[in-house]
Image (tube, rainbow, N blue to C red):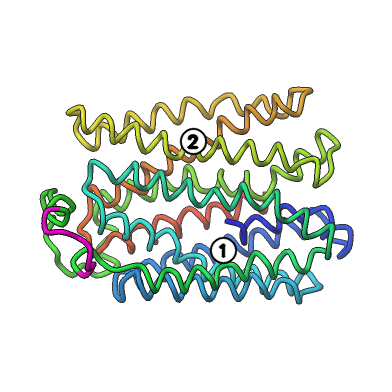
Amino acid sequence: YMDRQVIGLLKPPLMGDLHWTESDFGDIVATFSLFYAFGYVGFGRLMDRIGVRLGLAGSVAAWSLFACLHAAMGSVLGFKVARAGLGLTEGGNFPAAIKTVSEWFPAKERALATGIFNAGSNVGAVAAPIIVPLIVMLWGWQPAFLVTGGIGFIWVIAWLLVYRKPEQHPKLSAAELAYIRSDPVLPEVHIPWIKLLSYRGTWANIAGTCLSAPVWWFYLNWVPGFLSKRFDINLVEAMLPLVVIYCMADLGSVGGGWLSSYLIKRGVKTLRARKIAFLVCGLCVVPVFMASQVDSVWWAVLLIGVAASAHQGYSANVYTIVSDTMPHSTVASVVGIGGFCAYIVGLFVSIG
């Protein structure tokens, strides 16, 4: 998320130094969305084939390289190329992450686990508004891309050293493995990619992701510019408001996952618990339309923060519903299909 958010944070200096228009910026953001969509569907299938240990490591290494390459670009076309590479390779992240959760957690804990890792991704969204302006003040905008991109290579080493499937983990006891595998097992059969479109679980994920993901990208890419333009605050002054928004999003991510997990443990059927969480989160988003009408930056931050919080709680349950309804061998592929559809929608939202 640090790699993704840098360009939104650097929008004012990039537009000034490189003489971009709002249309140029929208096209660059749309390029990321287009290639991220194809990365989602392609890497989703790849994760099911080669596994998340090697698949995710390769994905993170590649996107870290493309993130660093932004620093060498000086034109709209160059940034489009860098964003295309970043989007394509970052498409492996969420299919792999959801598959990892399905490998390590039973159904009653998956939404909470998903909420926690999704909140972890928002740590980047919280850290970026703190780190990036400081780097820009000291060294300029190019090192901001190099530093945030370079962190990913450190993560790859840690992942390869630490991650194993439960069956292969040397410290996992037989009782713990039995707990992880305590759910009824859906048949593990090979399902051709195109046949996945005949499953209701696939379409539930498509619908839920299309309704949520483009909104989140709108927040990431346009909120810094909105705060700057609406309330006349600079990049440094926007640091605290952005940190507050993404800290609220963290709480919502964990809270939304916790809500459905709590309901399941209280005896509510799994899919009904997910639907209740969807309803609660959806209602919490409604007041955000007033953010452009208020006169105080902190009222706007509160409204956007509540909406971002609810969005992340909603997303935690959207992702989890795939592992509730689909065979384990198809989880990453289905998440990839949903992401592909959502980010094609996101492409048109960015252009608009």
Front-lying residue, 67 or 218: 67
Q: Position of residue 263 (x, y in %)?
A: 26, 29
What residue is at 27 percent from the left and 50 percent from the top? Answer: 201
Mark sitting earlier along the chain (2/1): 1
Point out residue 193 in the picture as x, y percentages from the top left corner: 29, 68
Q: Is residue 29 above or below residue 242?
A: below
Q: Which residue is mark 2?
A: 251
Rendered-image quadrant of the N terminus: bottom right
Does residue 49 appear to the left or right of 35 in the view shown?
left
Please, what secondary structure does the residue beneath circle 2 have? helix
The residue pinned by badge 1 equals 34
Q: Label 2: how many residues lie within 10 Å, few (<14), some (14-19) or many (20+)? A: many
Q: Nearer the viewer, residue 332 or 1?
A: 1
75 with respect to 332 (left or right) = right
Q: Amino acid at mark 1?
A: Leu
Nearer to us of marks 2 and 1 is 2
206 or 305, which is in the foreground?
305
Residue 276 among those drawn in magenta: no
Estimate how packed mark 1 is, as few (under 14), some (14 to 19) or many (20 or more) residues with alpha carbons within 10 Å.
many
- The kind of residue on which mark 2 rests is Leu
Name the spot of residue 351 as percent of width and height, x first: 67, 53
* Residue in view at x 18 percent, y 70 percent: 190
149, 339: nearer the viewer:
149
Which of the 4 image quadrants contains residue 54?
Answer: bottom left
- Magenta stretch? 168-175
Describe the element under mark 1 as helix, strand or loop: helix
Please indicate whether residue 236 sits to the left or right of residue 65 in the image.
Answer: right
Q: Is residue 306 found left or right of 99 in the rendered image?
A: right
SS majority, magenta: loop
Q: Is residue 126 above or below residue 314?
A: below
Quarter location, residue 170: bottom left
User: Residue at point 34% right, 41% down?
Assistant: 112
